[in-house]
Image (cartoon, helix red, strand yellow):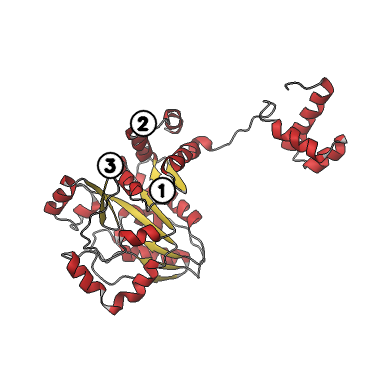
Amino acid sequence: MRGSQPEESNYILKIAYWYYKLNMTQAEIAQRLNLTRQRVNQIIGKLVEDGIVEIKINGLHEDNVRLESVFEQYFSLNRVFIFNVNESDDPLDLFGQEAAEALGYLIRDGQIIGVSWGVTLGAAVMKMQQKSLSRCTVVQMVGGLNSNSEMAKPDEIARTMAKKLSCDYHLLYAPAMVDNAQAREVILQDNAFEETFDLIHRCNIAVLGVGELSQSSTIYQQGFLTQERMERLVDGGYVGDLVMQPFKMDGTWEQENNVIGVSPETLAQIPCVAVMACGDNKTDAVLGAINTGCVDVLIIDQSIAASIAKKLSLDVGDMLEETT
């Protein structure tokens, strides 16, 4: 208690005890000690600085709050969620539970919610808690897929999320990919798609899975990319995709667009774009997605966070040690 007189030190300790332990208000303390409320406020404001009170945030270790804050500041993101799933028997299932809780924070009544596709997003939507948000609308942001996994399909993800939120949904009745950009333009001229794309353009939030480009990726394993096209993309420096739109590490999108769905230009205009990924094989894809400039919220596991920190030489060593 720097510079305090003995009698002053005594009531400083009383103030600390009454305020933090007994939950007394500043007005009550001021009246009891015959001090002004302003003086009590000044003393309370210096309790931590003077080392009289130490504030410990329980759960900081488990919840990666410090690490999330570093990522938010470094990448200029609105929110970052980092979850520990590395030691789980089923990391995707556990990540889905955690990501579902994050979606609960982000989704609000009255929103138009766009969704993409993929097993990670599907796992999160399956784990969402039931809510009653009847004024929401969920819209499918990319065309239909013949996937072996039901919950990887964008139409099934849209239906399931709408059921979880007790709201309406709107599907995009078109193939996800066509042969070329010219075929895409012809299809999009059909008036049948006007209402769907109007909703996509008016989305308040988009919830997307981040895909990586390799022979082990879902987009390749499910046959949506041929080996020739995959090799051409990888050789061209492309590292991942959002809603099937490939991008490079620096965030550059592929120029030829043959995807029936939301365009990169529209994604950039949506107020909140939340992307999720699990597994450090998606590190480059996540970095590329952030670098597109359209990402506002990042939902990842700690293995990706550790890989990104190492790749960018971020000073987060103690934080990673605390959470592993």
For marks 3 and 2, the one nearer the N-term is 3
- In the displayed structure, 132 sits above or below 24; it is below
Query: What residue would you read off at disc 1?
Result: 298
Mark 3–mark 1 distance (CA, rounded to whole Å) = 16 Å
In front here: 96 or 230? Answer: 230
- Is residue 322 visible from the viewing direction of this image? yes
Horizontal and vertical percent position of residue 182 = 18, 68
Residue that badge 3 annotates? 281
Viewer-closest of 43 and 109: 43
Instruction: Return the disc, 1 or 2, that comes first in the chain's sequence.
Output: 1
For label 3, the SS is helix
Residue at the outermost right position: 34
In front of the other: 183 or 20:
183
Determine which of the numbered discs, if any, sits on residue 313 in the image: 2
Estimate how packed mark 1 is, as few (under 14), some (14 to 19) or many (20 or more) residues with alpha carbons within 10 Å. Answer: many
Task: Report x, y in % for residue 99.
Answer: 42, 50
User: Going 78% across and 33% down the picture, which residue do you hit?
Assistant: 15
